[in-house]
Each structure stands twice: as structure tokens, then as C-alpha cells.
Image (spheres, rainbow, N blue to C red):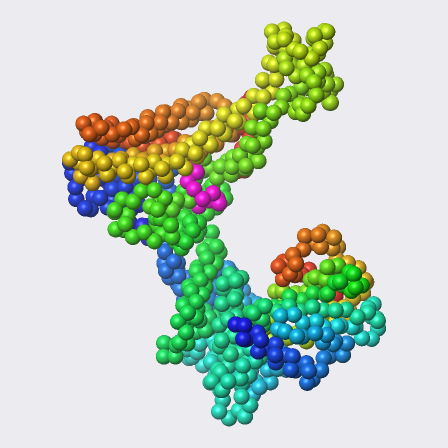
Amino acid sequence: MSSDYEYSDDENYFDDGDDMDTQEDAETFDEDEDDVMGVDFKTDDKGKRKAYELDYSSFSQSDVEDLMKKDIEYICGIFGVDSGFAALLLRHMAWNKERLVEKYMDNPDKLLVAAGVAAPETPIVPPNRLKSPTASQAGNTRRPTRTGSKLLGFGSKSSGASKSPTISPTISPTSSFSVQPKSPTSSEPFTCPICCDDVPSLKPVALDCGHAYCSNCWTDYISAKVNEEGDLIVRCMGEGCALIAPDSFVHSMLIPDPTAPIGDAEKEEANGNTWKRFQELLVRHFVSSNRDLKYCPYPGCTNTVSCPSAASKLSLTSVVPTVSCGARGIGGQMTQSQQAQGNLGLAGKEHKFCFGCPIDSDHRPVVCGVAKMWLKKCRDDSETANWIKSNTKECSNCQSTIEKNGGCNHMTCKKCKHEFCWVCMGPWSEHGTAWYSCNRYDEKGGIDARDSQSKSRASLERYLHYYNRWANHEQSAKLSLDLYAKTEKKMEDMQITSALTWIEVQFMKKAVEEVDKCRMTLKWTYAMAYYLASGNQKDLFEDNQRDLEKAVEDLSELLEQQIEPEMIPTLRQKVTDKTVYVQKRNEIVLDDTATGFIEGRWKWNVSVDGFDDPENTD
Amino acid sequence: MASISAKRLAKELKEIQTEGCPVGVNLLRADDFQTWLFSIEVMGESLYKGEVQTLQFRFDSNYPISSPAVQFLVRENEGIRAPIHPHVYSNGHICASILGTEWSPVLSVVAVCVTLQSMLASCKKKERPVDNDRYVLHAPENPKKTQFHYDDDTV
């Protein structure tokens, strides 16, 4: 089910620019991560996954509904029940088919009651108000036990034990609810116990329990449940009644029979939306019950990604499960033709997210655990660290952090009673009689004190070093929206001032996208480097990081350049070459880190969940 | 929607007027379909013997699909206080599941009154909820905005 552009065929655009003029080329142009590699990379691309990629597939909402249907049919086949009941049973067991079958064989009645499919054997006496003839009649003819015994019969039949051959195996295709037209024999007209309406046209509607209410109240109740509470479990409105309305019932209350429309267009639309929302809730429930599935976190997107290889917690220490749901743009509404138009910027961005953690972006190359730790540290510490750095000094004797909030330069440490000068940090005793004006910067005592101070600041400085670079790339990525806009403008200019066609200026767009992607990688390499234990591995990692960073900055600079018509062919060549190079460097970083995780090569300087504890490497 | 709640409340009001309230419950005010007041008193032997409480109902246009906002009326300056009960906060808010998750549209105002009356009647020790002070300090004006955690169904 993978979306069509993930694995499209390899084509080489940058080496032979002359071929880039067919429409098909344009459509696959920017979609493929692999297709623009240099010739030397092309050979080992085919059929072989890179270490940092993993198998996943994306589903649309209707695909997931098909999956649900398959499970439901499976249960229908085993238990011989109505699909609405099968769905309720599965939902009750969080879509765990094996457990459901097991529990059902164990004690079907108990399970049916717990799942809200059947009422308990001792039926709840309906409240007094429900004594209208229609309601009590419904109660008699629709005793829940009947349903229960029918289910039981088929359950045992399919399991091979022929315990109850007396029960006829014909499955009546009864819907699991009853819309009872008002009985003509009843002398008393139906009055809905909720809205107290008693117009003759009012139809009492009830689940198997027989608690009858008018269809308007049902509709309002379902709408309130679905829209306000976001709940897909719609219980019978009767007090203490635990029956749950099956999907077909919800549908019939929200979407009226085409032969008898409600006539109110506004209401019909609202109900239609409620039904859509209800279906979405069903899919979400299914997805959240299945470890192999995850819902796309992008706003308005209803796609689902399946990635079994990243479903276990253990696997997250060796892979970074970056996936894409296959949709692009806000709400995933972009059509293929729009994509082919080559829209840049946010509107056309791929929905990339991490399958393993709640970070809604691609945090390769660093694994989820470390990425989370880093984000937390940034949230907690970066402001504090900056403030400490600019507002405090440490006592040169005991290293306590001190903020000077007034008074003279003669400091006495609260903790160790050490007396020192705030200006030169030297001991106060050396200041002799030159009270309160320190001009003794070069004295040995002062230098020593400042040395020890800078040592104690080292860890803070180290953190800020990584943090600032991280934040810098994040900032640049934000600015990339501007860059997208500017590049689009430049591409237009180029088409006007030179003989290049639309297709031929796409190299600019490709370059901007590549820069954006690489900045994302770079950003996270700083998070990774901060936690890497020092050693040869870290040096190698930082070499790769440095090469990528250099290449990205070079390419960025080229993109920012003013365009002169006569320079365009050279610029095109340069940008194209650089893009390929940057891509290669990015691949090296990702590939090397990913391989490292699989080989267990990376050692951290703190303890990380799922990894060995750090050795002492100070 | 407004008409449904009005119709239903009109019906309930008529029932109260013709059939009367249960013992110990009296309608104090029902001038409109927004706010009703009842007095409730626990009959027979109980910790609340001789105490008369005022119960306030507020209805929104979604009643009876959505539950009414029910609380004991508190007017410190007039000497009206909430009963001391482990499920009643000193601001009058009540932690009772039928006012929240267990609400069912078939319940009525009278049914709520009776339930709360029996909640008081079955109380064994007069005390405030353990987290009373903390809750009252930050409580929203409307008790329906609070997510109560129903942990004890003995009283």
C-alpha cells in the first residue's frame, strides 16, 4: 500500500539535464529520495534498503476500515453473529481477536454483557415512565436473552462441539435494533420520555433492551456523545442500561432513509458530519489498539502508517522509525496534479513523523530516547543556563553559584564564608586598604580564581555550545519558508531572463528541499553529539557532521546569491553538483549513525533507556 | 433544542404540581426554565435531622441530553450553607456520579432530588471531602466543569 512516490524508479536528473522535459519526469521529480543520486550511487540503490530506512506502509482511512472489516468478518464467521455485534465485541477487547475468542469460549454470556451487546440475564426493570404499551411490548419481544442464546449456539457450533443442535442455524439478518412503528392496537399514544413529545407521527426507537425513545432524541444524544465527548461508545439512554448502540444503529439515526429525509438541510449536514466523525473515531480506536499502526499527527490528516519493525520498545534503540503517511500538505488534501505543479513550502510538505515517539518530526539520526531527553533538557535548562551564565559567578572557593543583587564588591560566600572581590574574583585579603575599587586584575590570586571559575563553567559552556547550534539550525529551518518563497521567485525570474524551461529550473527547488532536509539532520546531530561519550567514535561522528554542515552552508550561500543572467549556466552546474554532494553527505551521516545503532557502536555519556550504562570516560 | 428542554421541563413541572414532590422535598422556585430551587430535608433518623438544605438546579438548552448543573445553595451572609458530607464541598458542589458520567436523559429533577436525599440519609459521619480546601480554592463556578473522580459508592 505504499504511496506511489516512495519507491519510484531511479532516474538521473542532474547528470543529464537535457532529458528533463517530459511530463512524467516532472511528476516524479522531487518525490524520490533516491532518484537523484550520482551515478556511482545508483548501482547499489536498487532493491537494497539503506540502513536508516525501514519498511512501512501507509493506509488511508478507507484502507483501515477494510482492515477492520476483515477482523469483523473473521469474528462473524467464528461466532455466527451479526457484524454490528462482532464490531462491539472487538472494540470491547481492543481488537485482540485471540483474546476475544478465548474469552468467548470461556463464558460467552459474561462477555456479551460486558461488551454491551446483551443485557444481563436479570433484566433491569424499566423505569415507571416507560410503561407505555409499545415500550413494554418491545421489552417482551426483544428479550436480550434471545440474542444471547443465539450467539451461544453458534459459538459452540463453530468450535466443533455439537452441544446445541436444536438451535436453527439460519442467521436472520436482523439488524441489532428495532424501529417499531407505533402499534395500531395500542390505545395509548407513544410519548417520548425524554422530550415529552407525543405527536402521533413520533416513532419509538429502541435497542434490544426495549428502552424506547423518539428518534430525534436519539440523534441529539448521539451527536452530543460523538461531537462533545468524542466517545464512540453510545450506551442506551436508559438509566443503568449498559447496552451499546451498534454502528448500524448510529448510522440509521444520523443518516435518514433516502426515502424519508428529514428535510432540514442544515441538520442533515450536521448529522452527516457527526457520522463522519464517528467513523473517524472508530478508525482511531482501531489504530490506537494496534501496536503496528499509528495515526498521522498532522492536523486534518486521516492517514495511518503501519510499521511493525518499530512497534516494540526494544527496537527503538537500534532504529529511528521516521515514516511518512503518504499525504502532503495541510489535511493531506493535495492532489497529484498540485504536487506536479511543484508547490514549495509548507503547503506541499510531506507528512513525516516518528513512529516511535510523540515528536512530530524527523529526528534522524538520533534515537527516540536520546531525542526526548535532549528536548526535555532544552525545555528545562536552556533559559536557566543562559541566565546563570550571564548573571552569576561561582565562589572561587566552594563553587557555589552566586548572584550579586546589590551591595559592594566585597563578597562573603554564604556557604563557606570565603571573602572575595566580585570584580577580579581574587581573595579579598589581597585587596589591602584599596577598599571597594579593584584595579588588581593581573594579581595571581585573581587569575587562579578565574581559572577555577571557568573550569566549573565548562559543563554549562558545553551545553550551550550544542544548544546554540541546535537552535541555530532550528531557526534556519523556520526561515526556510522564506527561502522557499524567495526561490520560487528566482525560478520565475530565471525562466524569464534565460532560455531555461520550467523543468530546467527545478534544480533550485530540489536544492532548497535538500538544504531543509539536511538542516533537520544537522539539528539532531547536535543533540546526539551532546550525549555521545567522547572517543574515536564521537570524533568520527563529528567529522561527518562537520562535512555535512560545511556542504550545507556552501549550498545555502549559492542559493542566496543574486542571479545574473549570464551566470545562470554556471550557477546551475554548481548548485546541481553541490546538491548531489550535500545529499551524499547527508546520506553518509544517516547511514553511518544508523549502522552504528544496529552494531551497538554508540556509547553515551549518560544512562539512556535500553542502552548499557556509560563507562567512565571523563 | 431550546424547545425540547422547555417542553420537558414544563412537563416535569406539571407533574410536580399535580402529583406533588416526594416527602421532604419541596419546590421553592421555578419561575423559568433556567434555574430551579428545591428545599430538601432528610426524613427520619439521620445525622441531618432538622436541617433543611437548598438545592439549586441549572439547565442548559441541551437538557435532558446533558445533565443539569446541581449544587447546594450557599449564601454565607444569609446563613445558608452546604451540608457537611464527604461528597459535598463547602461551596455547595456535589461529587455524585449521576450528575456526571452516570447521568441518563431518562432521569428527572425529582429523581436527582431523591438520590441526593438518600445520599445524605446514608451518611455515617459528618465531614468535608478530604481535598475540600484545595478544591474550593480553584473550583469553577459551574460544577459541571469539574471532572470528579468517583471513588466511593458507599455513601
- Residue A296, above or below A112: above
Residue A3 part of the magenta segment: no
Q: Which of A158 and A503 is in front in this view?
A: A503
The x, y position of residue A428, in whole percent, is: 70, 12
The x, y position of residue B54, in whole percent, is: 74, 69
Residue at the location (46% across, 47% down)? A311
Left or right of A297? Residue B10 is: right
Residue at the location (36% across, 37% down)? A482
Q: Main secondary structure of the magenta part?
A: loop
Q: Which of B57 and A508 is in front in this view?
A: B57
The x, y position of residue A218, in whole percent, is: 51, 74
Magenta extent: A354-364
Left or right of A32? Residue A519 is: right
Observer able to see residue A159: no
The x, y position of residue A125, in whole percent, is: 63, 79
Residue A360 part of the magenta segment: yes
Residue at the location (41% across, 74% down)? A264
Left or right of A169? Residue B28 is: right
- Residue A291, above or below A210: above
Observer able to see residue A589: yes
Q: Which of B93 and A309 is in front in this view?
A: B93
Residue at the location (19% across, 37% down)? A496
